[in-house]
Amino acid sequence: MAVDLLDRLHLDVPVAQAGMGGQLAGADLAAAVAAAGGLGTIGLMSPARLRAAIARVREEAPGRAVAVNLLMPFVRRGHVRLCIDERVDVAVVAFGGDEALVRELRDAGIFVVVMVGTGDEARQAVVWGADCLIAQGREAGGHLVGTVAALDFLPQALSIARGRPVLLAGGIATGADTLAAVSAGAAGVVAGTRFLLTDESGAHAEYRRRVIAARETVETTLFGFGWPARHRVIPNAATERWCRADGTPRRIPALLNAPSAAAARYSPQGSERALVRLQHPRLPLFSPASPLAGMPADWADRSALYAGESALRISRVVPAKQAVAELAGA
């Protein structure tokens, strides 16, 4: 099945880059990964910027698949229409979705990948008609659907997938991780933190420095205003002030985040700088935004430093082309 997936998606290696949102995975990163033979995935952004990013990937990686991550809490109808109009090759449906969406995308000739973290979610994705599953483990960075370790969840996901290819996400940092996943039946891997730590990612240099220096990660919901879901981050001044030892937010931020999901519908893509500017480690209100290139370095203490447990095994920032090669075992 892995060979079929490589052929269908015009890949040289069974390596996909996670479509990190908040401008962390923009056209620079997706194009570099695609040109290197992996699946480069554009993170969700405004429709106008997304259209430009799709064109950029096609220009810089001709003949390669163009993939877009549909981060459902923030997806508008225009995003779906754009993917169809631009005839993207792959749509990754994450943190939501339904059968009607999957059918609409597939009817347009788009290969639909659904991210799942439990058996029930995998069964639901199969009912929807997903072409492929991403089985996410709990050790992944960023927002989480995974509830157990990736390699522990993989056998269940493979059984439920009924022959559909399954990509493994969570804890992917090296070629040995890719080999272990493929040997266990995965069609390939999805890496986020490894590609966050590349020259082409949109992450601020201080963000990347802290990830490389990290000695632990924290699973929390602190950076959840507008998206109160679990996520994994590197500790910073905000988590030290507002999280308990186990990562659970203290009472005030927990109360503020719990009813805030509707705010995602009114938060325009590209507003990360404005959101982070309003935040401060002393105040208990934190959006899902991360520190991006061009922001002040000290904003790394007031925003989400997303990273998976694989960060503890990554020691340097490299070009995306090198990251693809290393993950492929070259």
Image: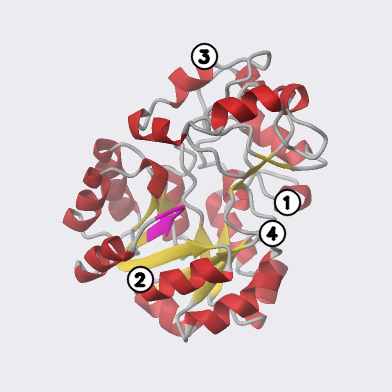
Element type at mark 2 = helix
Relative horizontal placement of residue 235, taking residue 254 as reference (left or right): right
The three-letter code of the residue at mark 2 reads Trp
10 Å crowding of disc 2: few (<14), some (14-19), many (20+) = some
Which is more N-terminal, label 2 or label 4?
A: 2
- Of the pair 195 and 74, the residue shown nearer to us: 74
| Residue span colored magenta | 92-96
Which is more N-terminal, label 1 or label 4?
A: 4
- Point out the image quarter for the C terminus: bottom right
The three-letter code of the residue at mark 3 reads Leu
| Mark 1 lies on residue | 309
Element type at mark 3 = helix
The three-letter code of the residue at mark 4 reads Gly
In this orientation, does residue 290 appear? no
Which is more N-terminal, label 3 or label 4?
A: 4
Mark sitting on residue 128 = 2
> Picture coordinates of residue 229 (x, y %)?
56, 43
* Disc number lying in front (4 or 3): 3
| Mark 3 lies on residue | 278
Above or below — where is 143 with respect to 145? Answer: above
Contact, mark 4 vs mark 1 (Cβ under 8 Å): yes
* Disc number lying in front (1 or 3): 3
> Picture coordinates of residue 263 (x, y %)?
41, 30
The three-letter code of the residue at mark 1 reads Glu
| Mark 4 lies on residue | 171
